[in-house]
Image: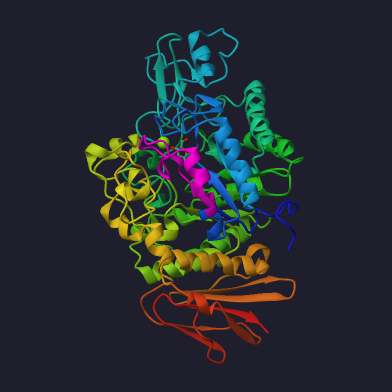
């Protein structure tokens, strides 16, 4: 394999470990995780066998959306530390052969960003056009019917300009006007700043929200029958619309070309998040096609509310092959925005183990969200302890995102499970203590070691990282496929159910691999899979 520093294609088969900085490790005793805490834990992340870390936003922010509302793109929020602390992370990570990806929010800023302060001051200032401003309708109501992802209209009245501004998310997150080339240039400068500090890539937040229709046309309704379980919870009126005009605009492509050109000299990687329940895979194809746009897109299909079944996974790849043949996906079951998948899909430990191996076998990069490697369930947070404005808005039907953002448990017996000496910003659930890292380290059969073995399997077989993948065959509740690169061919079959399934092997002679993971033995030309069992084999 090519070395850590010279392989420009490292991202394709990468396993990216997502860190939510507020909740990883606190070192200064304020109950909030920080950059020094991340640095301390980098050896642990390297020990998992991850290729990269993606660190959620740690920039200066009033924290209305917990860092996704940025007030200074080029400074670390004092709560998290300093730029010097970040430099230490980059140094240490590189010594551990870990790439560092940071999370850039380019579709909107905080309303406390100086750009917005200037923009809202008058209709004529130099940054007047840096955000999406619009006159009211003659009756004073909002310019159109667009809705905010976090509830309510997407427009907020501003008394200084006597105009509305657009916010796809919170009112404290005004949308930048990317149609203005000066805004794009300012964001390119931000990327340049971080590239100079040595980052290896960017996770581009809400990348399909960067442009809004210039004519501000109304979105059409989305018929009930066509709503799906990807993305916003069903009680959110955001689901009532087809998002034709408030995001996913064609102008995005030119912007992505600019980003790629900027990244090309260093080989840094762009991973764009596409929050879109309907045309998500099509956009993935459009945004990652060729070598001039994004390297890969963070898809929402594996974040679905209902469990991913064999037919559903086959359907996703079938569609991908049609609409994104040349594209590259990055998959995740869990992140800081959704209910942890062990709880979301009501998985027992055996099922969770099968899904972990499946993620390592499918084509595409993969993200693992902190604590996923411990098999953490979602925490149940009382209303009085909620922080997430999204959860507060849609309580009690949708409880928001705090349940997946609780502190990482390091030691079962330590105060606050070793996360902090002070009261953590979100409580440590009692159920997480026995699952803490130190407890699992001591048990060879624990989920943590299973994840290590699954990641090691992917590292050991280049076909799993970058190989081709045959169309997925579905047999009852089981799925199977072959990954191939040059003369290495790997057969992968998974029973995603409680009932036994028998899967026929592809032609050829196959030798079992992955026995240490629990892969079952082949019997002649088939594999008999008990509940949640899987079979991994290599062509002889
Ligand atoms: C992030 C969220 C955030 C939103 C607005 C996303 O998709 O993952 O956590 O609230 O963008 O920035
Ligand atoms: Mg702290």
Name the residue nearer the viewer: 170 or 446.
446
Q: Report whether residue 514 is seen.
A: yes
- In the image: residue 515, left or right of residue 64: right
Locate residue 183: give its quadrant: top right
Q: How is the model colour-coded?
A: rainbow
Name the residue nearer the viewer: 222 or 363.
363
For the C terminus, which image quadrant? Answer: bottom right
x, y (%) of residue 128? 56, 13
**Span shown in magenta:** 17-43
Q: Is residue 131 above or below residue 250?
A: above
Residue drawn at (57%, 24%), measured in percent from left and top?
A: 177
x, y (%) of residue 156? 40, 21
Number of marks drawn: 0
Instruction: Say whether residue 25 is magenta.
Output: yes
Residue extending farthest bottom: 524
Q: Is residue 285 above or below residue 149?
A: below
- In the image: residue 76, left or right of residue 499: right
Q: Is residue 140 above or below residue 381?
A: above
Residue drawn at (56%, 92%), measured in percent from left and top?
A: 524
- In the image: residue 508, left or right of residue 339: right
x, y (%) of residue 491? 60, 77
Locate residue 200: give its quadrant: top right
Instruction: Say whether residue 385 is magenta.
Output: no
x, y (%) of residue 118? 52, 12
For the N terminus, which image quadrant? Answer: bottom right
Residue drawn at (61%, 36%), measured in percent from left and top?
A: 87
Q: Report whether residue 249 is seen.
A: no
């Amino acid at each position: 394999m090519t070395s850590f520093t010279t392989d420009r294609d490292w991202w394709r088969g990468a396993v990216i470990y997502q860190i939510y900085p507020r909740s990883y490790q606190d070192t200064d005793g304020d109950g909030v995780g920080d950059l020094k805490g991340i640095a301390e834990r980098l050896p642990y992340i390297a020990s998992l066998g991850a290729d990269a870390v993606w660190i959620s936003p740690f920039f200066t922010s009033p924290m209305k959306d917990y860092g996704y509302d940025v007030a200074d793109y080029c400074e670390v929020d004092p709560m998290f530390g300093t730029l010097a602390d970040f430099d230490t992370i980059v140094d240490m990570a590189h010594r551990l052969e870990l790439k560092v990806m940071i999370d850039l929010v380019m579709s909107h800023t905080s309303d406390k960003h100086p750009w917005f302060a200037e923009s809202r001051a008058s209709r004529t200032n130099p940054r007047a056009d840096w955000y999406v401003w619009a006159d009211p309708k003659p009756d004073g109501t909002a310019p159109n019917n667009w809705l905010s992802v976090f509830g309510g209209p997407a427009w907020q009245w501003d008394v200084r300009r006597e105009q509305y501004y657009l916010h796809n998310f919170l009112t404290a997150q005004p949308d930048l006007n990317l149609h203005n080339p000066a805004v794009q240039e300012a964001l390119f400068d931000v990327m340049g700043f971080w590239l100079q500090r040595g980052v290896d890539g960017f996770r581009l937040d809400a990348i399909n929200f960067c442009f809004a229709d210039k004519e501000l046309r109304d979105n059409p309704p989305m018929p009930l029958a066509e709503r799906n379980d990807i993305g916003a919870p069903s009680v959110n009126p955001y689901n009532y619309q087809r998002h034709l005009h408030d995001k996913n605009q064609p102008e995005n492509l030119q912007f992505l070309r600019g980003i790629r050109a900027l990244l090309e000299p260093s080989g840094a990687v762009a991973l764009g998040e596409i929050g879109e329940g309907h045309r998500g895979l099509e956009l993935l194809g459009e945004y990652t096609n060729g070598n001039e746009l994004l390297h890969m897109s963070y898809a929402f299909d594996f974040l679905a509310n209902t469990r991913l079944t064999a037919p559903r996974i086959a359907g996703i790849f079938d569609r991908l092959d049609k609409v994104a043949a040349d594209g590259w996906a990055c998959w995740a079951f869990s992140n800081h925005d959704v209910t942890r998948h062990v709880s979301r899909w009501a998985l027992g430990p055996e099922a969770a183990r099968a899904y972990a191996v499946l993620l390592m076998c499918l084509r595409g990069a993969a993200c693992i969200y902190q604590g996923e490697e411990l098999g953490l369930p979602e925490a149940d947070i009382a209303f009085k302890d909620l922080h997430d404005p999204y959860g507060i808005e849609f309580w009690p039907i949708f409880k928001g995102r705090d349940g997946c953002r609780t502190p990482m448990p390091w030691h079962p017996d330590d105060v606050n499970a070793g996360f902090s000496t002070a009261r953590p910003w979100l409580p440590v659930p009692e159920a997480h203590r026995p699952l803490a890292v130190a407890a699992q380290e001591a048990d060879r059969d624990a989920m943590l070691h299973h994840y290590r073995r699954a990641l090691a399997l992917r590292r050991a077989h280049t076909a799993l990282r970058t190989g081709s993948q045959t169309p997925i065959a579905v047999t009852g509740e089981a799925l199977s496929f072959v990954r191939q690169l040059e003369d290495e061919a790997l057969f992968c079959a998974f029973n995603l159910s409680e009932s036994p399934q028998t899967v026929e092997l592809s032609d050829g002679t196959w030798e079992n691999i992955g026995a240490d993971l629990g892969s079952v033995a082949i019997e002649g030309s088939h594999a008999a899979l008990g509940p949640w069992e899987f079979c991994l084999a290599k062509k002889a």
